Amino acid sequence: MSYFVKVLADVLGVLYQNTGAALLLAALAMCIYILGKKQGAGPVVQAWIRQFRTNSSFRNCFFLIFYTGIILFHTLLCQKISGNPLANISGNWGIYDTARKLYTDNAVNFLMFAPLIILLFQAREEKDHTKKMPVQQVLVQGTEISFSISLGIELCQLFLKIGRFQLTDLFFCTLGGVAGGTLYWGYGRFRKKITEYIKELGGWNIRLWKPLTEKEIEEKALGTVDMTEDVETEADSAKEETQEEDLDPRYEAIEALVREAGDKLRNARPGEENIHKKEGLANFCTDYDTEIQRFLIAGLSEILPGAAFFGEEDTEGNSGALAEGEFTFYIDPIDGTTNFMFDYHHSCISVGLAHREQMIAGFVYHPYIDEMYVGVRGKGSYLNGRRLTPEDKPVEEGIVEFGCARYNENGIDWLFRVVKDMFQNSLSIRCGGSAALGLCRAASGSNTVYLELKLQPYDYAAASVILEEAGGVITQIDGSPITFHEGCSIIGGTPSAWRESKEAFEKYREEN
Ligand code: IPD
């Protein structure tokens, strides 16, 4: 026991003695990295702080240099010049020295090298996909790296006469490296289980979003729940029912109209004669887009006389970006026009309703599989009448969807860099071709997040309420609020996936 206490005290001693110098070294090294890109001390400090907060590779490199600094200061720079550096080459393999005092150098070397190798692998994760390496490769690399570093240190000690050359040092440092590699590999594989276990142990396994109750899960499996059914706890259920009763009947009328428009879409088959080119590359409008928009404007004007319209297509009654009124409908008659042209059966009708500046209701209908998403501000979101309460899943636990359009390729390299990152961190990636459905699927929990660099308000207006009412977050990629008078970039998803996506855009911004 006293041996372990002594080892711990020695490790802490090493960390404590060398921390200040190593911290300075790491901070300066990362400043030099930033100086290569920026000019002037002010921007460097700001960029330093921003990078540290948002960029995980930057943080990894910082900690790696910091930790390497500790080892260097401990093993080389703080050593006293000794007599003969070749005395006792074999070193002491036991836990007592010649004076019968506890000898902890071997254990300290082992414990110092394990984290070093973990940090090194983490710093290379981004570039070399170390997370996916098989265990043999991790072990070989861990051995090679720790052996080379410790050999370098021992040779410096030998030739510069700042310590002793000892085989025990080489052996235990290398062993520490191998242990670090194994831990890194194992943690990469079992990270989820380990963190879940630790959270459970500490009682921190609280979800931000309310998880489904057992009854809800059962009902979900049977697919029997509708909006009026009792899906919450008893207290919540009473509240829900009142909300249902409170709901303006005009919302039901809008929903019925959107369904009708969906039937038109499902039954339509565009031929070449119905497809027209719009401005820009691969940008199309079909006669069905215009027809459905006209149908919606006529029907919605009856439901809410005096409302203004901001629709995608150029039809009468559509005041477009100039729409200004107490109430404004944002209409995308067919979101996923290209899919529609090629019979992909993945397009929808999207209608959002704004009261002055605030989007208050959204209706998105996927007619091919009869999925109706409805979100009403303050009353929740529903998919075919089923309340949406998805879990706050991070990117690594689900599917990421993104969108892009040939007529808008600004920043496309940046987007694809982020998408590659997301692909490597998630379970899979999709590009479905309908932004409204992509966002609604984040609301229902099918996607963790939806990303796109440029969309128009009618693409996301309806889905934004649905997502927010389901507990999700939707903003522009820099985190600023989405705009409804003009188009903007979009990240919409669970709070965790939204945060991670924002960080990914930030991380690759400078490379763009
Ligand atoms: C398009 C779709 C697509 C997105 C494009 C949008 P449209 O809308 O939402 O997923 O990537 O940027 O323009 O033209 O099919 O209504």
Image (spheres, grey):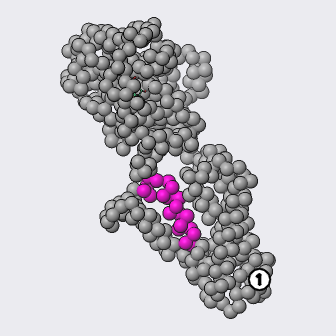
Quadrant of the image containing the N terminus = bottom right
In the drawing, does residue 149 fall left or right of residue 205? right
Q: Nearer the viewer, residue 438 or 223?
A: 438
For the residue pair 309 and 383, the one nearer the viewer reads as 309
Q: Determine the quadrant in which ligand 1 lies.
A: top left
- Residue at image location 27% in from the left, 31% down from the top: 486
Task: Answer whether residue 197 is visible to the viewer in this image.
Answer: no
* Image-based side of 316 in relation to 161, left or right: left
Give the x, y percent position of residue 270.
43, 11
- In the picture as drawn, the residue positioned furthest to the bottom comes out as 83
| Residue picked out by circle 1 | 89
Q: Nearer the viewer, residue 48 or 248?
A: 48
Q: Which residues are magenta?
A: 51-70
Query: Left or right: where does residue 286 sit relative to residue 149?
Result: left
Magenta segment includes 55? yes
Dominant SS of magenta comes to helix
Label 1: which secondary element: loop
The image quarter containing residue 356 is top left
